[in-house]
Image (spheres, rainbow, N blue to C red):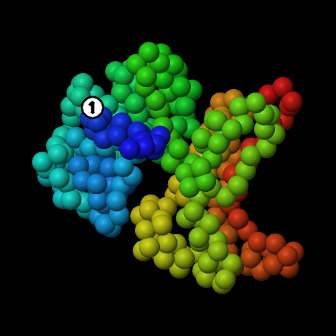
Amino acid sequence: RKITTRTMSSLAAATLRPLRIGMVGGGTVGGGVYDIIMGRLGGSSVDTTGQMASSSTRRCVITKICVRDLAKPRSFHVDEDKTTLVSDVNSILDDDSIDIVVEVMGGTSLARTVVLEALKRGKSVVTANKALIAEHLSEIHTAVEQSVGNGVKFGYEAAVAGGIPIISTLQNCFAGDIINEIGGIINGTTNYMLGKMEDGADYDEVLKEAQDLGFAEADPTADVEGHDVRAKIAILAKLAFGTTVDVEEIPCNGISQISSVDFEYAKLLNCTIKLIGTAARLSQYG
């Protein structure tokens, strides 16, 4: 029988024990992560849509989820045979059987402690917390370098334009290049809202619609005031230019003051209105 590289890869993945994951946070985002990992990569090879998970992908199982309130009803089903809910994050950090910590709690205070402690203890970390990364990326990279002997990794592709993807592209494909400028539309909520407003919708009306559809949070400040874009462009600037930029020093204007009149003026100029994050190199030396 001919055994191809793909077949050997599948066999290798099948013989490895599942990666054990501790997830910190059990809200809406955490529920989505749990369903994907446990449905497609967990104990079953069939996900909730009936599609087969890749046979060359190593199995994963979320063994613990840390939440604030154990009694609070969850918006997702937890497989109690495989996953334990805990309220003390040290139950995850102190568990030597856990390989990866997934941070989906949000915020920058406790989340920072969780990320740094996990890396220090030899656990890889995955997060999409752009506010945390924008403020503490250099510190996190230092923690990764200090734990390099443990083989730990810090994954944050989903923090900025994960569907492109842009972070791995900057990290792996442009290492020998000098990037002079980077920018783009990097917030889907405001892009959706501005598209609707260009068609004549009122700001308050389209904001409510975005919230009803789940595009905007109950408190939309981070999106509509540009804070989300500001954090993302700080991350991209660090990757593109190797320079840490203080998030608070980045000029920031959101869309909350935009009205239909602004779109009328833009149309007269044969233009439209978009929320853009942009960063440029001011010197050839840095």
Name the amino acid type tagged 1. Ile
Disc 1 packing (10 Å; few <14; some 14–19; many ≥20)? many
Q: Is residue 179 left or right of residue 239?
A: right
Q: Is residue 58 left or right of residue 228?
A: left
Rendered image quadrant of residue 169:
top right
Residue 149 visible, this angle: yes
Q: Position of residue 202 (x, y in %)?
A: 60, 80
- Residue sitting at 79 percent across and 43 percent down? 181
Q: Which residue is mark 1?
A: 98
- Residue sitting at 24 percent across and 53 percent down? 44
Q: Quadrant of the C terminus?
A: top right
- Residue sitting at 63 percent across and 35 percent down? 171
- Residue sitting at 85 percent across and 79 percent down? 268
Q: Position of residue 74 (x, y in %)?
A: 22, 58
Which residue is at the front of the view, 24 or 7? 7
Q: Position of residue 136 (x, y in %)?
A: 52, 31
Residue 228 visible, this angle: no
Q: Position of residue 159 (x, y in %)?
A: 52, 46
Q: Quadrant of the N terminus?
A: top left
Q: Secondary structure at mark 1?
A: loop
Q: Is residue 178 left or right of residue 221?
A: right
